[in-house]
Amino acid sequence: MKKLTVRRSHRFRIECYDAEGRLKWVEELDNIVVNEALDDMLSVYYKGTAAPSAFHVGLTNANPSFSATDTMSSHAGWTENTSYSETSRPACNFGSVSNQSVSNSGSPAVFTINANTTVGGAFLTTNATKGGTAGKLIGGVAFSTNRTLAANDTLQVTVTASMSSS
């Protein structure tokens, strides 16, 4: 009997625009889905527990290192960057599921940078509290290189979640 493997992934697309709306750079990277999120997905699907009602995107400071054991309350390899004008983490409003994929491409999460800062990655969580440690961490991604941002830059983050079997 052939073993069926289900693969879960998130792809982050981060676009940075300057104050005049000109594209400065783009990153597209796959992230780690942490154990906490994998356990939650199994609990929701197979045990009937309540699914998260909302998802939010956050940013990290320079040089993040994500681990499968990270949670929102315990993540030694990274710290959150809160140098943006929004009062909470931007929502990640996923659209319709199609072909084993769903994304927020119709409404990317937007960060309005309010100070010169360096970011090194992004993460997906179930909690909107800027700088908070509550909620579930879904996963995170380290950029290919740290990125220096200027006040009034804007980041647009699109997250695509996919599942496949093999």
Image: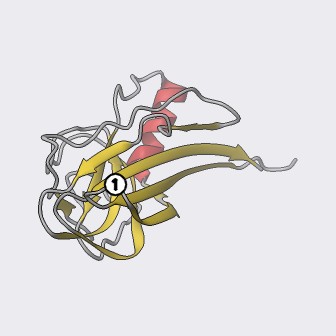
Q: Residue at x 48, y 60 (%)?
A: 31
Dot 1: within a 10 Å radius of its alpha carbon, few (fewer than 14), some, or many (20 or more) residues? few
In the image, residue 144 lies at what x, y percent? Answer: 44, 75
**Image check: 73 left or right of 121?**
left
Which residue position is annotated with label 1?
A: 21
Residue at far right of view: 1
Residue drawn at x 14%, y 58% as measured from the top left: 83
Q: Is residue 69 visible?
A: no
Q: Position of residue 70 (x, y in %)?
A: 32, 59
Q: Nearer the viewer, residue 9 or 51?
A: 9
The residue at 25%/40% (across/down) is 135
Q: Is residue 123 visible?
A: yes
116 or 127, which lies in front? 116
Relative placement, left or right, of 41 versus 122 is right
Extreme residue toward the front, this view? 20
Instruction: Tell me residue 47's x, y (percent).
Output: 49, 25
**Residue at (27% x, 71% y) in the render:** 77
